[in-house]
Amino acid sequence: MDKTYIVKVNNQEDFHINTSDINQLDLVKNSKGHYHVLQQNKSFKVEVLSGDLNSKHYQINVNGTNYDLQISNDLDCLIENMGLSNHVSQQVNTIIAPMPGLILEVQVKVGQDVQENTPLLILEAMKMENSIVSPRTGVIKSISVKKGEAVEKGHLLIEFESE
């Protein structure tokens, strides 16, 4: 089944992209965060400048121009349309792998105090490096992965101490 995503570029223009569109891209990873994309016989040099998998917010550079991307799926749009996105508050005590991938770097230690949006680790998945950041302020209770380890979707990565 084809999933559709809405990509808001520079907080202005929305593009609807489905998985068929993504699968048709000719994408080659050149080096860490650098890609060559060929689409409809046009060549693009793409660099992922930063990415936050939790908030689905990315900054990229395409052929020398920077773009700010916010990616939403159908559920994100439904929650936003219902006005619930700003009213949901949940205490997150565990970070799990959102998709299968490879742990490239663990950026925190057990016992470390972290603030919301502190980078925790880097997960390489689907030819992209994803920075997993802290969803809250807290103390790292345990780290269940190490650099170079392959993980499956749903694998426990990091656990916070309960408040």
Image: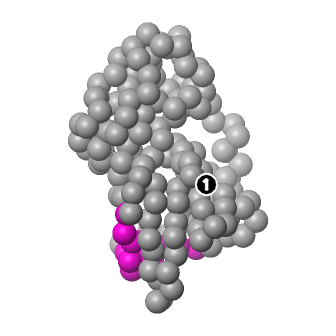
How many discs appear? 1
Amino acid at circle 1: Gln
Q: Is residue 100 left or right of residue 163?
A: left
Residue 117 visible to an observer of this rendering? yes
Q: Quadrant of residue 65?
A: bottom right
Which residue is drawn at the image coordinates 44% and 65% (left, top)?
35
Q: Is residue 77 left or right of residue 48?
A: right
Q: Classify 10 Å Cα crowding around label 1: few (below 14), some (14-19), many (20 and above).
A: some
Which quarter shows the N terminus? bottom left
Instruction: Work out whether 34 lies above or below 148.
Output: below
Q: Position of residue 135 (x, y in %)?
A: 55, 31
Mark 1 residue element: strand
Residue 95 visible to an observer of this rendering? no
Instruction: Work out whether 155 lies above or below 57.
Output: above
Can you name the residue that lies furthest to the right here? 12
Q: Is residue 104 left or right of residue 84?
A: left
Which of the pair 43/122 is nearer the observer?
43
Which residue is drawn at the image coordinates 55% and 19% (left, top)?
114
Which residue is drawn at the image coordinates 67% and 44% (left, top)?
84
Q: Quadrant of residue 146?
A: top left
**Magenta-drawn segment:** 16-29
Instruction: Work out whether 97 lies above or below 14.
Output: above
Q: Position of residue 117 (x, y in %)?
A: 59, 32
Q: Quadrant of residue 95?
A: top left
The reply to whether the magenta stretch includes residue 151 is no
Q: Position of residue 133 (x, y in %)?
A: 52, 34
Instruction: Identify the coloring.
Output: one colour
Which residue is drawn at the image coordinates 24% and 37% (left, top)?
149
Identify residue for label 1: 59
Instruction: Work out whether 119 lies above or below 84.
Output: above
